Amino acid sequence: MKLAIVDQVPESPKSSYTCEYFAEEDFKEEPPVLPPHLSITVFSSGNVDGEPSGIAPPHYSTVNHVYIDTAAHQNPEARKCVCLGITHRFRNKYVSMVLYKPKL
């Protein structure tokens, strides 16, 4: 019975790699559409039962995703800063962070 040596990994064939440059038609395609469940974030949802401090728990698919403020693309005054947001889960709690960075 032969044993496999862990340090020796079989090489991938050289023919599987190419050095082709992008063509113009590669850039004409539209980027993929954002899945609908990622468009609803903790930051865009309303309060729970009218409580000012109560926010609904985020959808599990939106946790650990970085979001950028899209209003900056619509309002010229909002282009002065970039807003990033992310939500992490720690045990049964959710922690949301927002980062505001001024554009120089």
Image (tube, rainbow, N blue to C red):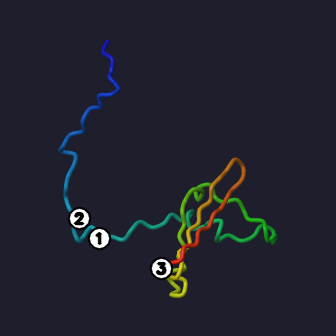
Q: Which residue type carries mark 3? A: Leu
Alpha carbons under labels 2 and 1: distance apart: 8 Å
Q: Position of residue 37 (x, y in %)?
A: 57, 63
Specify the quadrant of the image occupied by residue 25.
bottom left
Question: What secondary structure is found at the residue carrying circle 3?
Answer: loop
Q: Nearer the viewer, mark 2 or mark 3?
A: 3
With respect to residue 92, does 86 lie above or below?
below
With respect to residue 21, does 77 lie above or below?
below
Question: Which residue appears at 70% of the width and 59% of the height?
Answer: 57
Q: Which residue type carries mark 2? A: Phe
Question: What secondary structure is found at the residue carrying circle 1?
Answer: helix
Residue, disc 3: 104
The 10 Å Cα crowd at callout 1, few under 14, some 14 to 19, many 20 or more, is: few
**Mark positioned earlier in the residue sequence (1 or 3):** 1
Question: Which residue appears at 55% of the width and 83% of the height?
Answer: 78
Residue 27, numbered label: 1
Alpha carbons under labels 1 and 3: distance apart: 29 Å
Q: Quadrant of the N terminus?
A: top left
